[in-house]
């Protein structure tokens, strides 16, 4: 394969890397008090180019590059498109909120691009060491972005907590890779599957699997590795929270799918019970924790823990439908959660003026567009029909039922009922009779970037709930790719 052909396999990552470098080079050239919004629009253009490059990769035949460390297939393209879309909306939301806090925006735009590079590498890597490199690129970017509000005490506090706990989780992940290497003699994901399927499962392999689960469990804020989420969500800027609650998690779930279904299918009797309990505990703890929250960002943090549990339900299905359901749910959760944070970011700004649920009382009367959009995303998070949230949960629970996981499905349905209460609280507040509030009176007019962001997220939520065929087809194609990879490798080793 020629060098140019290999570059095509990582074209979105190359585009975003160049974009981030250009932003870093351009930022010092601007006057100290000059607007950094042109750098944001450059980031938007670069992300759009990466998004189109991801779609273009569907025309490439499935294959690997760079000595088999990266693979382009329907599975990787699905998550490339999802991550690029999330970053695009986040950039638009940041441009909208930037007028009230322009400090270090150039750095923030560059970090978003570099973070996306790491997330995309995670989703297409077929070598555990490259997964680790992508994980570090993504993590370091999000650690820094979490501390963007340097003038607020909560910003540095949240970043320090995120960094310290994240470092421990990364260490577990790296030790897991080392133990898997000790058990198999390789860190190549398809080869691991073939070696484990032809010999007695070594103890080091099982321990390594458990450590990798710990590392990924932290990244997706699944119980019992969720302790960082509420404080980090509260302290980080709202646009950054919208990004870190969706894109890094999507990339981490992509890694978990590839590792469990492609590298460790022989160990399914060991990891399936662990995933079962993580799913059940995440759903229950997340929803019960959200019931007590008055801060809207902390409520959505506990909500994200619960949604990680819903998504993990699909992992236990042990079928292509389970893989496809997990991929589809990651997409549906991303569009509705990023949309909700788009409204919160505009209303509260970078400094989070509106922190409590009651602060949004009467929002629909002061801005029908913002109030209606927030209500729509909350309805989708509940799982009302004709939204992406409904079809995502339906598909996840259907795949679990088809695999005989009746009790886990019942736990999921009960938790979905609990979630209705705390999602209705901000919904009722938005449409309650308005009271005099200097905070709400200060909400600025809707800008063009925010209009585009809301259009993308609202349209995405509706499409995934009403006509999900195209997205579902790509998710199923990616699921079949993972299944065929491990089958082919196992056959070749035998």
Image (cartoon, rainbow, N blue to C red):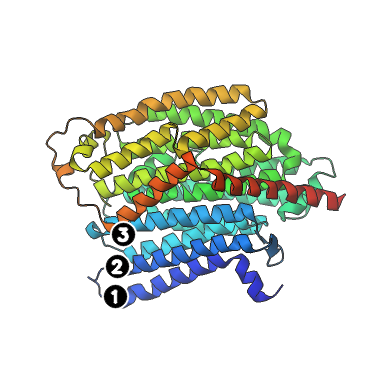
Up-down relation of residue 26 to residue 138 (above or below): below
Q: Position of residue 211 (x, y in %)?
A: 63, 43
Q: Residue at x 36, y 31 (%)?
A: 423
Q: Can I make out residue 276 in this image?
A: no
Secondary structure of the residue carrying tag 3 is: helix
Up-down relation of residue 122 to residue 245 (above or below): below
Sooner in the amino-acid sequence: mark 2 or mark 3: 2
Residue denoted by label 3: 95
Q: Position of residue 376 (x, y in %)?
A: 35, 38
Taking depth in this image into account, of 168 and 253 the one nearest to the observer is 253
Residue denoted by label 1: 30
Secondary structure of the residue carrying tag 2 is: loop
Q: Which class describes the residues within 10 Å of circle 1: few (<14), some (14-19), or many (20+)?
A: few
Q: Can I make out residue 176 in this image?
A: yes
Left or right? Give the position of 220 relative to 25.
right
Left or right? Give the position of 433 relative to 339.
left
Residue denoted by label 2: 36
Left or right? Give the position of 77 relative to 238.
right
Q: Position of residue 22 (x, y in %)?
A: 42, 73
Q: Residue at x 43, y 43 (%)?
A: 461
Taking depth in this image into account, of 116 and 24 the one nearest to the observer is 116
Mark 2 and mark 3 residues within 8 Å of each other at the beta carbon? no
Sooner in the amino-acid sequence: mark 3 or mark 1: 1
């Amino acid at each position: 394969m020629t060098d140019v052909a290999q570059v095509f396999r990582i074209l979105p990552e190359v585009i975003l890397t160049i974009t981030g470098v250009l932003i870093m080079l351009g930022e010092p050239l601007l006057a100290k008090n000059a607007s950094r919004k042109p750098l944001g629009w450059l980031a938007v253009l670069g992300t759009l180019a990466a998004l189109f490059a991801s779609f273009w990769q569907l025309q490439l035949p499935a294959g690997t590059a760079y000595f088999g460390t990266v693979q382009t297939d329907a599975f990787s393209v699905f998550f490339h498109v999802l991550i690029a879309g999330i970053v695009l909306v986040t950039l638009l939301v940041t441009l909208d909120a930037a007028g009230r806090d322009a400090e270090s925006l150039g750095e923030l735009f560059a970090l978003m691009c570099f973070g996306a590079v790491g997330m995309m590498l995670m989703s297409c890597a077929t070598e555990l060491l490259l997964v680790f490199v992508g994980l570090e690129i993504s993590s370091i970017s999000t650690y820094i972005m979490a501390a963007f509000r340097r003038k607020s005490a909560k910003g540095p506090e949240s970043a320090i907590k995120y960094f310290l706990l994240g470092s421990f989780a990364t260490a577990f992940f790296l030790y897991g890779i080392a133990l898997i290497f000790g058990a198999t003699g390789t860190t190549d994901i398809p080869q691991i599957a073939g070696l484990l399927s032809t010999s007695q499962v070594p103890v080091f392999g099982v321990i390594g699997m458990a450590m990798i689960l710990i590392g990924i469990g932290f990244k997706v804020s699944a119980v019992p590795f969720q302790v960082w989420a509420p404080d980090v969500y509260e302290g980080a800027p709202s646009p950054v929270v919208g990004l870190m609650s969706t894109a890094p998690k999507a990339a981490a779930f992509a890694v978990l799918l590839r590792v469990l279904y492609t590298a460790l299918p022989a160990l399914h009797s060991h990891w399936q019970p662990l995933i079962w309990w993580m799913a059940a505990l995440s759903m229950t703890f997340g929803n019960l924790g959200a019931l007590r929250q008055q801060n809207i960002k902390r409520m959505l943090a506990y909500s994200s823990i619960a949604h990680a549990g819903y998504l993990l339900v699909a992992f236990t299905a042990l079928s292509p439908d389970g893989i496809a359901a997990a991929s589809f749910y990651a997409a549906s959760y991303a569009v509705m959660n990023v949309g909700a944070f788009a409204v919160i970011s505009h209303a509260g700004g970078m400094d989070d003026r509106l922190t409590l649920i009651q602060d949004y009382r009467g929002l629909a009367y002061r801005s029908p567009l913002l109030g209606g959009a927030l209500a729509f995303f909350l309805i989708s998070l509940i799982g009302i029909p004709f939204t992406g949230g409904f079809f995502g949960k339906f598909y996840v629970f259907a795949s679990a039922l088809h695999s005989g996981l009746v009790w886990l499905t019942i736990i999921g349905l009960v938790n979905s009922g609990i979630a209705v209460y705390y999602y209705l609280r901000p919904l009722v507040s938005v449409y309650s009779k308005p009271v005099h509030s200097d905070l709400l009176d200060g909400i600025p007019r809707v800008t063009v970037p925010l209009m585009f962001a809301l259009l993308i997220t609202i349209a995405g939520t509706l499409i995934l709930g009403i006509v999900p065929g195209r997205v579902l087809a790509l998710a199923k194609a990616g699921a079949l790719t993972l299944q065929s990879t491990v089958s082919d490798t196992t056959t070749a080793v035998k």
